Amino acid sequence: MIIYIGNILSGNGPSNVDKALVGKLADDIYFIQATKRTLSVKDIISIYSSHTIHVSAVSLLGLVVLAFSKFFGKKTTFTMHGSLMIEKEYRHVPYIRICFEKLLVIGCDTIITVSKRLESYVGSVYPKSAHKVISIPNGVEELNNGSSIKEKKIVCIGGGRAEKRILSVCRAFEKLPLEIKQTYRIIVYGEEGSDSDLLQSFDFVTFRGFVAQEELLREMSRAEIYVQYSKYEPFCLAVFEAMSSKCKLILSDQIGAIDYLTDIDRSIVSIAKNEEELVDCILESIKKEAPEYSSYENLGWKEIAREYLTLWGRSSA
């Protein structure tokens, strides 16, 4: 049996990953919600009789179960959807959570990162643990979600978090010709952050905040352009959701998902390295025809689940 400690309730990116992955794993997976305050008798018996303990993202419960499992000689793995040691450069991260991450990195036998870029980042931040860091990407669900009628909207995800650099997108948009600024709107989704007030001061911005995944996908299906100009983005499932929605894509060169695009799609997607290039990319995207992207069946959740099961020494899902 494999114990999987994760969070399927919060609705954020890592939570959506946990829901999708757990749904594709074999029947001998025993899931424990990471936000549980106490373990049941069944939980404890399952942990004791398990073969492997897997912790998805940083949690106190994950750390407690890790300590218990190491005492009994269990195999342990830890998925990092990002690194708090890196993220603390962009936002406030409680020191205790950074300590939790460090202990999980030190204690687990294998550290799974969600992209090749994050694997490199984590190896540099935790050099003594670099030898046990690997990458397994997030899975991609092919939605075929795009509407045939696109609205003049530019979707950005990341809310007011400074590292998402949506403020830079708005500054680039301000430099566009007046007729474009009068006909297009930037729709911002995501949590509040240090840039929220400034973003909402632009008259061409609609700040929707944090919404359910279903609402976000509906908006993306109608939007013409999707921009993710993040300074730090370990993977970014939304890239593939935007492709399924047939949006024109503009990305920074720091998006982990870029490494998993086909050569054809890399030639279609616009990559911006600075605000000047961002202006040009928006103008070019407005002029482009609706894109046709590749299939990503090889990155489906069933295939990703198979990689995890192989790592854990189990048969394929």
Image (tube, rainbow, N blue to C red):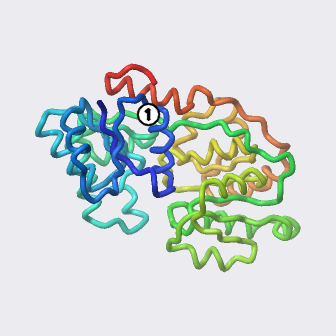
Image spot of residue 238 (x, y percent): 60, 48
For label 1, the residue is: 136
Hey, which quadrant is residue 46 in on the image?
top left
Q: Tell me which residue sits at (48%, 37%) in the image.
A: 23
Which class describes the residues within 10 Å of circle 1: few (<14), some (14-19), or many (20+)?
Answer: some
Hey, which quadrant is residue 237 in on the image?
top right
Which residue is farthest left? 71
Residue 129 position (above or below residue 296): below
Disc tally is 1
Q: Is residue 286 left or right of residue 234?
A: right
Image spot of residue 124 (x, y percent): 32, 44
Q: Tell me which residue sits at (70%, 64%) in the image.
A: 187
SS under mark 1: loop
Residue 106 visible in the snapshot: no
Residue 296 visible in the snapshot: yes
Q: Tell me which residue sits at (29%, 30%) in the image.
A: 1
Hey, which quadrant is residue 5 in on the image?
top left
Image spot of residue 14 (x, y percent): 46, 50
Residue 234 position (above or below residue 261): below
Q: Tell me which residue sits at (78%, 35%) in the image.
A: 292
Residue 50 position (above or below residue 317): below
Image spot of residue 174 (x, y percent): 74, 70
Residue nearest the observer in this picture, 122 or 39? 39
Q: Is residue 150 left or right of residue 242?
A: right
- The type of residue carrying mark 1 is Ile
Q: Is residue 174 left or right of residue 107?
A: right
Which residue is farthest front? 41
